[in-house]
Image (cartoon, rainbow, N blue to C red):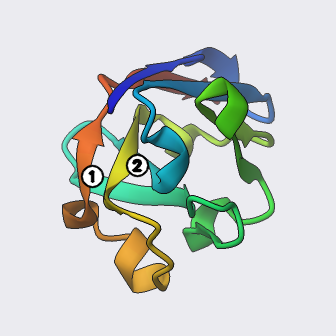
Amino acid sequence: VQLQASGGGLVQAGGSLRLSCAASGRAFSNHGMGWFRQAPGKGREFVASISWSGSRIYYTDSVKGRFTISRDNAANTVRLQMISLKPEDTAVYYCAADRSPYTSGSYAYWSDDNNYNYWGQGTQVTVSS
């Protein structure tokens, strides 16, 4: 699976962005997907995940109610809709694919970046105050 993230940009606080992650490879629909982010000087942080079937979705607490993850298996795409953006959301955002197909898993599983072995190149999100 190869991943290409896009949709980042500069937005004022309170604004919105929609990130997209396009995947190549027929196995996309069998794998859970996640979004992570990394702010300058900080480690990589889990943002959201969606299982292969779309039945299990998880968010980190700081984005609940503001971010929505979705997937379109026919289009080999996963999206992250972000609203009410805050300056602390500023980071490079990465999409990633689960290392194993057909995984269910708990929040602990999906929030661990060691469980993803396919990563996109990242897209910059900058939120100005």
Residue 68 is situated, as x and y percent measured from the top left of the image, at 75, 51
Residue 25 is situated, as x and y percent measured from the top left of the image, at 40, 27
Alpha carbon separation for disc pair 1 and 2: 7 Å
Assess whether mark 2 and mark 1 are in contact (beta carbons under 8 angstroms): yes
Eyeballing the image, is 66 above or below 90? below
In front here: 12 or 18? 18
Q: Is residue 42 left or right of residue 58?
A: left
Q: Is residue 72 left or right of residue 1?
A: right
- Which of the 4 image quarters holds residue 122? top left
Q: Residues within 10 Å of mark 2 (few under 14, many from 20)?
A: many
Q: Is residue 58 left or right of residue 16?
A: left
Eyeballing the image, is 10 above or below 94? above
**Residue located at (67% from left, 25% from top):** 75
- Which of the 4 image quarters holds residue 78? top right
* Residue named by callout 2: 36
**Residue located at (65% from left, 42% from top):** 86
Q: Amino acid at mark 2?
A: Phe
Q: Which mark is residue 44?
A: 1
Q: Amino acid at mark 1?
A: Arg
Eyeballing the image, is 102 above or below 68? below
In front here: 70 or 111? 70
Mark closest to the chain's N terminus, 1 or 2: 2
Q: Quadrant of the C terminus?
A: top right
Residue 115 is situated, as x and y percent measured from the top left of the image, at 25, 65
Residue 33 is situated, as x and y percent measured from the top left of the image, at 48, 51
Q: Residues within 10 Å of mark 1 (few under 14, many from 20)?
A: some
Element under label 2?
Answer: strand
**Residue located at (40% from left, 49% from top):** 36
**Residue located at (50% from left, 78% from top):** 104
